[in-house]
Image (spheres, coloured by chain):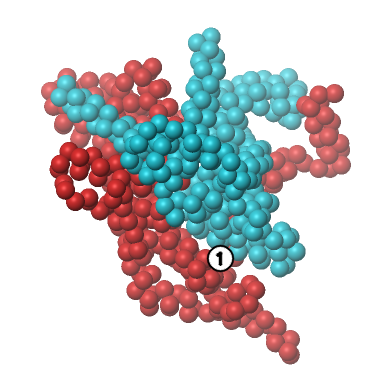
Amino acid sequence: MNATTLIANVMRLLNRSGFRARSLVIAVPFWWLFVFFLIPFAVVAKISFSEAIIARPPYSPLYTWTEDGVLQLKLFFSNYAYLLDDTLYVSAYWSSIKVAFFSTVIALLIAYPMAYYIARTTERRRNVLLMLIILPFWTSFLLRVYAWIGILKTNGIINNILMSVGITSEPIIMMQTNFAVYVGIVYTYLPFMILPLFTNLVKLDPSLLEASADLGARPMTTFFKITLPLSVPGIIAGSMLVFIPVIGEFVIPALLGGPDTLMIGKVLWNEFFSNRDWPVASAVAVVMLVLLVIPIMLLRNAQNASAGAAS
Amino acid sequence: MKKNSWFITIATILGFAFLYIPIISLIIFSFNESKLVTVWSGFSTKWYGKLLSDPQILGAAWISLKIAFVSASLAMVLGTLAAFVLVRFRKFHGKNLLSGMITAPLVMPDVIIGLSLLLLFISMESIFGWPAGRGLTTIIIAHTTFSMAYVAIVVQSRMIDMDGGLEEAALDLGAKPVRVFFDITLPMISPALVSGWLLSFTLSLDDLVIASFVSGPGASTLPMVIFSKVRLGVSPDINALATIIIVIVAIGVVIASMQMKPRKTS
């Protein structure tokens, strides 16, 4: 008996006992995500309203039964007040948004010509180039960030080249600066920008461009009047795929940034692992999620728009 | 037009140089004799020897491979079910919620996923007594959860592209839905299953942040060990490790693309 008939037989038995296969097929992935993806957010939200105490686990219970059997609910808004009060958190959120915004813009400027070129080239070359875009994505992200340490550090590759050519006599300090963080972020997230742009640009109808050229438009005019407006869904999708994860990025600022590189992912990490303040770490996460709601909605709309255009 | 494409060609070449110079420098300096990663002092393979005799790295690599194998397999099953349900089933209760839950992990920052899952595991332990402590099991659950989203995306786009007529014909001829799924749908989406599995496997091998949150004592994954080493400074045996990974991936990608080709032309 092969596997298919075995499974068919099992399903027949289940069917006979009044069981519906359809609901099982829905239930398994649904409940997995419900329990391990959705409920965790509720737990984080709950703990963000509790008080840090020295115990295991290190936070106070939200509700307790008093001695006369009354349910007592204690919500501590102090964690959120603390986030607003301490300038560290506000400036960390602000600088995360700034870093995410500028690295998204830089990535877009680098990615657009690349995606455009790949979309226009011969099919043979296109497949090779797409493979080259995806290949770094399959190798370790951590190790690719690590590679930049060797390139950017004081006695690193760039400084060695600059000094041996004689452009500078003193090494330029690039490591542990925001410059290094930008380089690392743009570098690792570039493929996420190129791929949605490419999928969008490759669908662009060439006859539109021909018509525009025939009617006497200059290439620049055609680009700004036709190509660019039509690629807006790709631009939004790619930008959000960079912007959203960069907001919470931890590894890149931790490895390439310095002590004054302030990003909220790093703050959350330190709050949790160094200060062991779980309620404040949870509040940091909740505020981060709230900030991400609008970008995530934008991404969903852009993806739905491109899915609608494809079908 | 000519001037424009000239500009775009240069920009593309520079873009690819930006993507590949760090990787090439990693490989070159893994064969450097000196401990200084960035000053060339002669060819040597001693860092490979040092790497392969480092019990901490080897142990962590083994743990990571086990986690990646199990979570990729689970994610492949769960992600395929989710994709199938979303593409083939008509409206059902919670369809929107499911499609939201399957795309959100793709963009959710790692620190949020890691923190929220850890707090869930701790709450579950205090209520149900499971999972007892944290370690391989909790990392596997966490990796399965975000990997199944990637599998679902890959399988979903394959299912939308493929011809639904064969499935309908089989159903019309009286085949049971389960049979249709295993005999027709599954073979047709199998390339997507393979790439989904491979993607999950590499994502799991790569994850540092989520694993750091949900791991426990005695379950240090390879990225966790690399991270703690890298924080102390650059060391050539990490370059050697990177080179090994890059070579394995490159071979895998080349083999995969060679297997795809004959099918395309025939």
Determine which quarter of the picture holds residue A25: top right
Q: Residue at x 54, y 52 (%)?
A: B224
A96 displayed left or right of A4: left
Crowding near the residue tagged with mark 1, few <14, some 14–19, many ≥20 C-alpha atoms within 10 Å: many
User: Taking A187 as reference, is B184 above or below it?
Assistant: above
Name the spot of residue B50 as percent of width and height, x first: 53, 40
Q: How many marks?
A: 1
Q: Nearer the viewer, residue A261 or B32?
A: B32
Residue B76 visible somewhere in the drawing:
yes
Left or right of B125, for residue A134: left
Q: Which colour represents chain A?
A: red
Secondary structure at badge 1 equals helix
Along the line of sight, the residue nearer the viewer: A250 or A218: A250
Q: Quadrant of residue B155?
A: top right
Apparent side of residue A8 relative to residue B147 in the rendered image (left or right): right
Q: Position of residue A188 (x, y in %)?
A: 39, 43
Which residue: 16% across, 31% down?
A: A220
Amino acid marked by disc 1:
Val
The letter of the cyan chain is B
Residue A248 can be seen in this image: no
Choose between B218 and A2: the one closer to the eye.
B218
Residue drawn at x 49%, y 22% as measured from the top left: B254
Image position, residue B146 (x, y; %): 56, 47
Residue placed under numbered mark 1 in the picture:
A44
The residue shown at (60%, 43%) is B58
